[in-house]
Image (cartoon, rainbow, N blue to C red):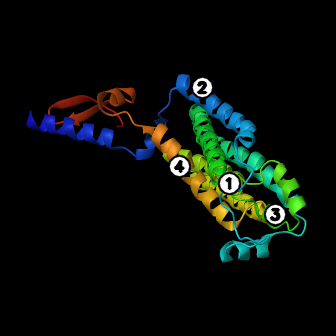
Amino acid sequence: MGRVLGALVAGFVLAVAGDARADEDEDLAHDLRVDIPVTAGLAAVTVGFRLVRDDLEPSTCRWCDGSTPGEVNAVDDWFRTALVRPDTHPANVTSYVLAFGAAPLSAAGMTLLASFHEGRQKGALVDVLAIAEAGFTAMLVTEVVESLVLRTRPYVHAIGDDEERARVIAETGAFHSFPAGHVVGAFGMAAAAGTVASMRDYRLAPLVWGSGLAIGAATAYTRIAADRHYFTDVVAGAAIGTAIGVAVPVLFHPPVRRRGVAKLFDRASLFVSPVPGGNVVGIGGVL
């Protein structure tokens, strides 16, 4: 009897040990009844705040750089001198294409590619929702912080003529230099997509991270080249975006790993092991 019991236990252990990747259908925590309205709400609040914030802000800077036109700290001055293009318009247009076109397409597209590559597309909607929640959260945080900090954009600060500067300030966005919103959004979506792919244990997760961060870096460069942000603005934007992009999926959509009997019987299998004097019939699965 002892030998029979030993064989049964040994068979059970071998059955549940398995490769960790065998549980490829592990889900991320979600509730579509909550996640879809939350994502839509974040999008609406972000757009709505963007539309009204200029009317709510003072028309003067709170973070005002040097007293003479273009005077700024040594670090920002060095990068501005080195990277700003003589004609800033192409770089400005490119930054919009990268931040609001390439970044979301890469984040969603590369994550979908990673899931379809492994035949795990049933979790694609949850992946995209997690990325969207992080992206909109990052952009909303940026809108609020920009309105609180009110740092003058470099191209505005560099205007020497008082009347011309006043005319430009009357336009929207003159004091939205810190942090760099385009960069926050690009890095936020890149980090969210990479985090989701890593939590899913997709084989293409490094590609998801790499493509997203490359677009984020390109966005940061073009914002400096367009003279819309200082170096410190884009560094802060990258840090804020990455932190939010990682935090939202980790905190609100962590991997769900079923344990114990429920998971065992979900992947249960029957086995027969020969032992002296007969056979042992057992049930096993992957935990």
- Local packing at callout 3 (Cα closer than 10 Å; few below 14, some 14-19, many 20+) is some
Front position in the image: 244 or 104: 244
Q: Name the residue under label 2.
A: 37
Res. 104 image quadrant: top right
Separation of residues labelled 4 and 1 (CA atoms): 26 Å
**Residue at (73%, 70%) from the top-left corner?**
67
- Local packing at callout 1 (Cα closer than 10 Å; few below 14, some 14-19, many 20+) is many
Image vertical order of residue 247 relative to residue 218, above or below: above
Q: Name the residue under label 3.
A: 155
First-in-chain label (4 vs 1): 1
Separation of residues labelled 2 and 1 (CA atoms): 31 Å
Left/right of residue 43 with respect to residue 159 in the rendered view: left
Q: What residue type is labelled 1?
A: Leu
Q: What residue type is labelled 2?
A: Pro
- Local packing at callout 4 (Cα closer than 10 Å; few below 14, some 14-19, many 20+) is many
Q: Name the residue under label 4.
A: 246
Quarter of the rendering occupied by the N terminus: top left
First-in-chain label (3 vs 4): 3
Q: Which amino acid does label 3 sit on?
A: Tyr
Look at the numbered discs 3 and 2 and tell me whether their residues touch, using CB distance below 8 Å.
no
Left/right of residue 131 with respect to residue 25 in the rendered view: right
Separation of residues labelled 4 and 2 (CA atoms): 21 Å
Q: Which amino acid does label 4 sit on?
A: Val
First-in-chain label (4 vs 2): 2
Q: Is mark 2 on a helix, strand or loop?
A: helix
